[in-house]
Amino acid sequence: MTISEFTLKPRDEEPVRRLEIFTGSGRRREWPPEAKARMVAESYEAGETVCAVARRYGLSPQQLFTWRRAARPPMQEAAISESMFVPALVTAPLPKAAAKHPAEPRRRESARDAGMIKLEIDGIAMRVGRGADSKTVAAVIRALRAMS
């Protein structure tokens, strides 16, 4: 069948079997900022889901999620630019007093302790091992700073 067979011709002897009428607007709609804000606020209400709100207004849930993301307050630039490192102190080991008992053989550092960084902030010690997530470490350091 070709597309021309689906068009209505005044001379067609066969009656129209199917007719679709689109009552809504086209796929692209312009929503005023007030309407977007109202829909985003509705999606945050208790007992509401993003999908239900989107369905109610004829949106896709992805569109509503995009509006929600755009409505979030931006992260402050100052918090990002602030230094995340603290000065490192390297101290020499204290001389040990002569032991009365024979010294115990030194334990070798286990492989899991190798490459570990120890942070101490106001008496709170934190050990950061190999492969630690930098975002998590930064969050812990920020929390320790806030406590001091």
Image (spheres, grey):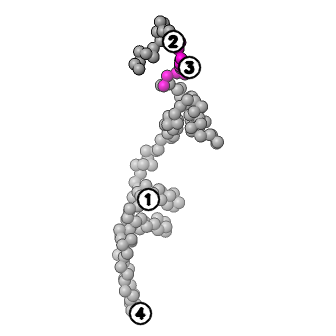
Q: Which residue is mark 1?
A: 137
Which residue reaches farthest top?
A: 11
Q: Which residue is mark 3?
A: 23
- In front of the other: label 3 or label 2? 2
Q: Amino acid at mark 3?
A: Thr
Q: Amino acid at mark 1?
A: Val
Q: Which residue is mark 4?
A: 101
Q: Which circle's residue, 4 or 3, is located before the other in the chain?
A: 3
SS class, disc 3: loop
Residue 148, image x and y in percent?
51, 61
* Residues marked 4 and 3 touching at CB (< 8 Å): no
- In front of the other: label 4 or label 2? 2
* Residues marked 4 and 1 touching at CB (< 8 Å): no
Mark 4 → mark 1, Cα distance in angstroms? 41 Å
- In front of the other: label 3 or label 1? 3
Task: Indicate whether 131 appears above or below 74.
Answer: below
Q: Amino acid at mark 2?
A: Glu
Q: Which circle's residue, 4 or 1, is located before the other in the chain?
A: 4
Depth check: 113 or 87 in front? 113
Mark 1 → mark 2, Cα distance in angstroms? 75 Å
- Quadrant assignment, res 101: bottom left
Residue 117, image x and y in percent?
39, 67
Task: Indicate whether 116 appears above or below 7.
Answer: below
Mark 4 → mark 3, Cα distance in angstroms? 95 Å
Depth check: 92 or 51 in front? 51
CA neighbours of label 3 inside 10 A, class few (<14), some (14 to 19), many (20+): few
Q: Which residue is depicted at the point 41% across and 20% down?
A: 1
- Magenta span contains residue 110: no
The span shown in magenta is: 14-27
Q: Which residue is mark 2?
A: 14
Q: Which residue is depicted at the point 45% across and 16% down?
A: 6
Which residue reaches farthest front?
A: 13
